[in-house]
């Protein structure tokens, strides 16, 4: 069964992670039925600043406004199976951990948790405070997956996009997509 997924982009630094995720989803379109996208209030500004106004990759999706509580995935009765928040700001993570559903992203996360569906938070912050760590612990215990935007170097990346793709491939693998990615085999 193909997936219906939501991609949420917050105003955390790391817009390149969202860009690469959306581009990768283009190549995996045979593995999903529907892809919804929502940008937080600050996400577009950060995208434009960090990516020099790069256009959003063209994928067949529906984009929802951050205050659109009529979006289908704002309700547990919808059949969206996964939400990836990439990048995920610590403010968004904290609101989700506290049960605050003040925008579409936090409401969708609340729905994923209560319905026991996949919620992946691609955090992009360093260093972490005790509050951040406690919120991550709470969300992990509630069923979320915290997947820090920490690239791997096994495949000897040659550019920033290669590094970013190590994180994005891992995220997509976590939600069940078949992704052509480097896998450690323990051999030199």
Image (tube, rainbow, N blue to C red):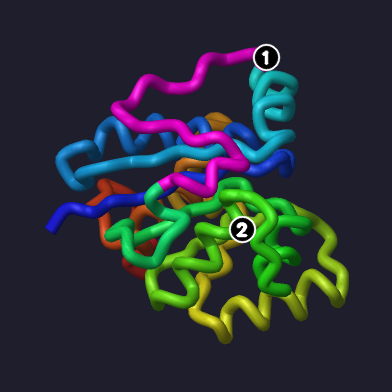
Q: Is residue 26 above or below residue 126?
A: above
Q: Residue furthest left?
A: 1
Residue 139 in view of the camera: yes
Q: Tell me how many marks there are.
A: 2
Please identify the quarter of the rendering in which residue 65 is found. Answer: top right
**Tag 2 residue:** 106
Please identify the quarter of the rendering in which residue 100 is found. Answer: bottom right
Please give the name of the residue rendered at 28% of the width and 60% of the height, measured from the top-left corner. 79
The dominant secondary structure in magenta is loop
Q: Is residue 150 magenta?
A: no
Tell me the magenta residue range.
Answer: 52-71
Residue 163 in view of the camera: no
Q: Tell me residue 20's x, y (percent).
A: 47, 34
**Tag 1 residue:** 52
How dense is the environment of label 1, judged by Cα within 10 Å: few (below 14), some, or many (20 and up)?
few
Distance of label 1 from label 2 (alpha carbons): 27 Å
How dense is the environment of label 2, judged by Cα within 10 Å: few (below 14), some, or many (20 and up)?
many
Q: Tell me residue 3's x, y (percent).
A: 24, 54
Q: Is residue 170 above or below residue 100?
A: above
């Amino acid at each position: 069964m193909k997936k219906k997924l939501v991609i949420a982009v917050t105003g955390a630094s790391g817009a390149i992670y969202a860009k690469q995720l959306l581009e990768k989803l283009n190549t995996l379109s045979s593995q999903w039925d529907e892809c919804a996208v929502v940008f937080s209030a600050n996400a577009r500004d950060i995208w434009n600043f960090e990516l020099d106004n790069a256009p959003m990759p063209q994928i067949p999706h529906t984009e929802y406004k951050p205050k659109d509580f009529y979006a289908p995935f704002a309700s547990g009765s919808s059949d969206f199976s996964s939400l990836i928040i990439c990048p995920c700001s610590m403010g968004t993570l904290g609101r989700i951990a506290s049960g605050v559903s003040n925008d579409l992203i936090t409401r969708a996360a609340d729905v994923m948790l209560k319905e026991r569906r996949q919620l992946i938070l691609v955090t992009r912050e360093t260093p972490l405070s005790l509050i951040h760590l406690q919120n991550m612990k709470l969300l992990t215990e509630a069923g979320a997956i915290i997947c820090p935007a920490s690239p791997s170097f096994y495949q000897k990346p040659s550019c920033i996009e290669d590094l970013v793709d190590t994180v994005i491939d891992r995220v997509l693998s976590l939600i069940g997509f078949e992704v052509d990615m480097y896998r450690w085999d323990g051999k030199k």
